[in-house]
Image (cartoon, grey):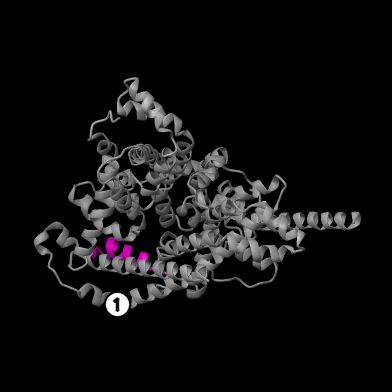
Amino acid sequence: MQTKLSNAKKAYRSQQWLAALVLMIGGILVAIPFIWMVLSAFKPESEVLKLTPTLWPETFTTENFLYLFENMNFGVYLKNTIIVVLCSFVGLFFNAMAGYAFAKYKFKGSEKLFYLVLATMMIPGQVTMIPVYLILNQMGLTNTMAGIVLPGLVGAFSIFLFRQFMSTIPNELIEAARLDGASEFRVFMQLILPISKPILAVQGILTFIAGWNSFLWPLIMANDESLYTLSVGLSLLKGQYGGNFALQMAGSTFMVVPIVIIFIIFQKHIIEGYTISGMK
Amino acid sequence: MKSYSKSTPYLFIGPALILLAVFSLFPIVVALVISFTDIDLAGLADYSNISFIGLENYKNIFSDPIFMKSIGNTLFYVVIGVPLVIACSLAVALLINFGTARIFRGFRLIFYMPSITNVVAVAVVWTYLYNPQFGLFNYLLGLVGIPAIPWLQDPTIAKGSLIALAVWRAIGVNMIIFLAALQGIPKTYYEAAQLDGANNWKQLTNITLPLLRYAIFFVSITTMIGWLQFFEEPFVMTKGGPLDSTTSVALFIYRNGFQLSNFGYAAAGSFVLFVAIIIITMIQFRLQKKETDF
């Protein structure tokens, strides 16, 4: 009996090692594009074009990054991207407000309106792409920052997540705040939002990532280079400097690394977010 | 016990709902209407240039060889891509869930990483990796004596190359969904099975997979909808080439709408895609119902 048990234990342990080994190989495969990107970004162009590539940069250079800012307008693209990110946080606030109303107020048509909100999740982007362009064109917002930001400002899924979370806040708390004479908006700002920190954290990070990565609307809306975001600028770089891989890798590194750092810091929140949303 | 005025809730939902109405709901109506017109740049400048042409756009689009090709390509992406995504993300999730050591949490991080990174940046990096002369992939193949592969130059291989990139990006999110579902399975089921002498394989096929049914269903629906709208990868990496062999329906719509300014024609294409998504999703729901019936 004793040996049988220890045999089982041994088998279990070797299975653990096997699983780790398989994941290790898979993980390296998954990580290769990142590693290659970062390493190539610090190589001079001549080294990248060698027929036998070097893994580690032989001559370490930050020239590529400097070129992006000095000869391309990456400073402007960065500024625009940050504006897009900041605006999308306003959208996040709208989502939270709507989620709160759907969670805690009884009003006429609330259920129907909520289903309407959910229904917008099913509409593919390709269907709304052209009419939204025409609508914004009618409003005179093409080639403006407002036109870039507005279409993606609010999202049904985010409203849904806020509603799910805020329904769990006890009504007594809200009533107590009202008895103390707080206005409805104050209740929301000073009671509901602080309680909703976990969901705000998840949504905040996802909003940041989505804003930082936004590509389609800036691409459609911006005619002037002065309105380009980083991802549009990067696709432009790919077109203009098709053969200059070191420069392209530097641009990609500049886009990817901030997100990876933010993700590593906050990864616990993001992954927990899937549990909050009840996606089981 | 109501201390707020009747209008308060509407003020709270107002901003979000107005934006959703203007940029999600109203556009559907606009798209439907313009899909029956010949609106283009001239029509945009002066509405009197627009005329209703009935079903002309729909008739034309189904005889457009590039549109038919893009449907074929999109189906190819779906048929190959969806099972690959499910298999890979499920396998990774099972392995990570099986592991007990701390290092397995690190793996979760690594596999999730591609899904949060910018698609343009990633497409630029992969284009470099795929480069026939200077790319890493062909160099590595060369080391083991395999001749260079035209990753993005050959019509069929190019489709596969784009799928590889998209699968790489899709594993992360779906793996997390599977992990959440796996952690929801009570440990007692496995303990009972072990007492009955069931081996790992039997536990997997008789407990884990049946209980993951809903997660698998959810992932397959969302993944399929995503692949039907496949856009950024071919847009950045191949521009739909070579010879339109990687053009997806979504790329076809974008190109007609924003590069050729055939807004009406593109809107008709987008409605065809919309209807296809609805039909395929409904079929999947039907199949799922049948499966749970027995």
In this view, the residue farthest toward the left is B48
Residue A276 in the image: state x and y as whole percent.
50, 44
Residue B249 on the magenta span: yes
- Examine the image and state in which quarter residue B9 appears: top left
Which residues are drawn in magenta?
A: B247-263
Image side of residue A121 versus residue B227, left or right: left
Q: Chain of mark 1?
A: B
Q: Using the image as rendered, state which of residue B140 and residue B20 is in the foreground.
A: B20
Residue A198 in the image: state x and y as whole percent.
49, 36
Label 1 sits on a secondary structure element that is helix
- Residue depicted at 47% across the width and 50% down the height: B118
Above/below status of A56 relative to B155: above
Image side of residue B186 versus residue B38, left or right: right
Residue A186 on the magenta span: no
Q: Amino acid at mark 1?
A: Phe
Q: Using the image as rendered, state which of residue B216 and residue A18 is in the foreground.
A: B216
- Examine the image and state in which quarter residue B94 appears: bottom right
- Residue B6 visible (yes or no): yes
- Examine the image and state in which quarter residue B212 appears: bottom right
Residue B280 in the image: state x and y as whole percent.
40, 69
Q: Using the image as rendered, state which of residue A219 and residue B91 is in the foreground.
A: B91
- Residue A222 visible (yes or no): no
Image side of residue B253 versus residue A23, left or right: left
Q: Give the class, few, some or many, for how many residues have Cα within 10 Å of label 1's Cα (few <14, many ≥20).
A: few
Prevailing secondary structure of the magenta residues: helix
The residue indicated by pointer 1 is B62
